[in-house]
Image (tube, rainbow, N blue to C red):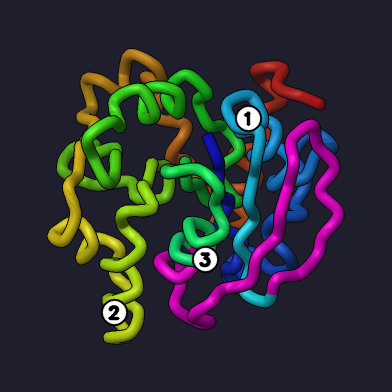
């Protein structure tokens, strides 16, 4: 299994490089890498400019630039899937430090026969903690060439398996896999959670 980390955002609400913010002495992106390395031998970091950044970790890590710059997460998914050597890949954001490894494994487990496996909670989809097949590439490219950036548009064009809340609750009852850090308040919440629960380096 390949994993793709989307790290092309501007971090405008947080200030500074979001991926390098520290929780318990470890950068946000390193938290993500450490979780993904349990399920993936190959990790791709999709960035806006293809920066070769020093991400130490046990897995093989490749950095790719967006093929369609400025197209948001959908562009990052396209670049990552294009670079992936496997038929499908887990896709996550660089600002989700508390990913459930068991949930990621479950997404892969139920993926055969589908082009995408997407968590859904209370009717809300979570496309940035999901699994995508390379079969999605043609549809994504078509959307990007039409300057369409909404990921949900893709799901009308491919075969999707939605993972519902009761399934998610078996692995991640607090839904922390979908906790993203967009503001200073979010960052402080994450730091408090990590400290209270002894999640450290």
Task: Please say if the residues under marks 1 and 3 sit with CB atoms less than 8 Å apart.
Answer: no
Magenta segment range? Answer: 50-76
Name the side, left or right, on which 109 lies relative to 39.
left
Looking at marks 2 and 1 on the same chain, the residue that comes earlier in the sequence is marked by 1
Q: Residue furthest bottom?
A: 146
What whole-number distance in Å separates the C-alpha atoms at marks 1 and 3?
21 Å
**Residue at x 16% of width, y 61% of height:** 157
Where is residue 31, by image quadrant?
top right
Task: Please say if the residues under marks 2 and 3 sit with CB atoms less than 8 Å apart.
Answer: no
Where is residue 53, by image quadrant?
bottom right
Report x, y in % for residue 181: 56, 50
What whole-number distance in Å separates the C-alpha atoms at marks 2 and 1?
31 Å
Dot 2: element? loop
Residue 181 seen anywhere in this rendered image of the structure: no
At label 2, counting other C-alpha atoms closer than 10 Å, the crowd grade (few under 14, some 14-19, many 20 or more) is some
**Residue at x 23% of width, y 62% of height:** 154
Dot 3: element? helix
Can you tell which mark lies on residue 148?
2
What whole-number distance in Å separates the C-alpha atoms at marks 2 and 3?
16 Å
* Camera-side residue of 74 and 114: 114
Q: Is residue 69 magenta?
A: yes
Give the labeled residue for mark 1.
Answer: 35
Looking at marks 2 and 3 on the same chain, the residue that comes earlier in the sequence is marked by 3
**Residue at x 77% of width, y 54% of height:** 20
Quadrant of image for the C terminus: top right
Report x, y in % for residue 113: 22, 35
Give the labeled residue for mark 3.
Answer: 79
Looking at marks 1 and 3 on the same chain, the residue that comes earlier in the sequence is marked by 1
């Amino acid at each position: 299994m390949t994993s793709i980390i989307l790290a092309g955002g501007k971090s405008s609400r947080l200030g500074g490089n979001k991926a390098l913010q520290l929780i318990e002495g470890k950068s946000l992106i390193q938290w993500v890498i450490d979780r993904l390395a349990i399920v993936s031998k190959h990790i791709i970091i999709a960035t806006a400019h293809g920066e070769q950044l020093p991400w130490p970790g046990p897995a093989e890590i490749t950095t790719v630039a967006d093929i369609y710059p400025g197209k948001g997460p959908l562009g990052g998914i396209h670049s990552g899937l294009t670079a992936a050597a496997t038929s499908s890949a887990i896709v996550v954001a660089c600002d989700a430090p508390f990913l459930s490894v068991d949930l990621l494994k479950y997404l892969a487990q139920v993926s055969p026969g589908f082009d995408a496996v997407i968590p859904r909670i209370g009717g809300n989809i979570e496309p940035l903690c999901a699994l995508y097949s390379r079969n999605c590439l043609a549809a994504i490219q078509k959307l990007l060439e039409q300057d369409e950036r909404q990921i949900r548009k893709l799901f009308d064009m491919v075969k999707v398996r939605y993972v519902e809340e009761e399934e998610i609750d078996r692995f991640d009852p607090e839904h922390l896999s979908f906790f993203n850090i967009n503001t200073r308040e979010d960052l402080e919440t994450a730091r408090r959670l990590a400290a209270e629960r002894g999640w450290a380096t």
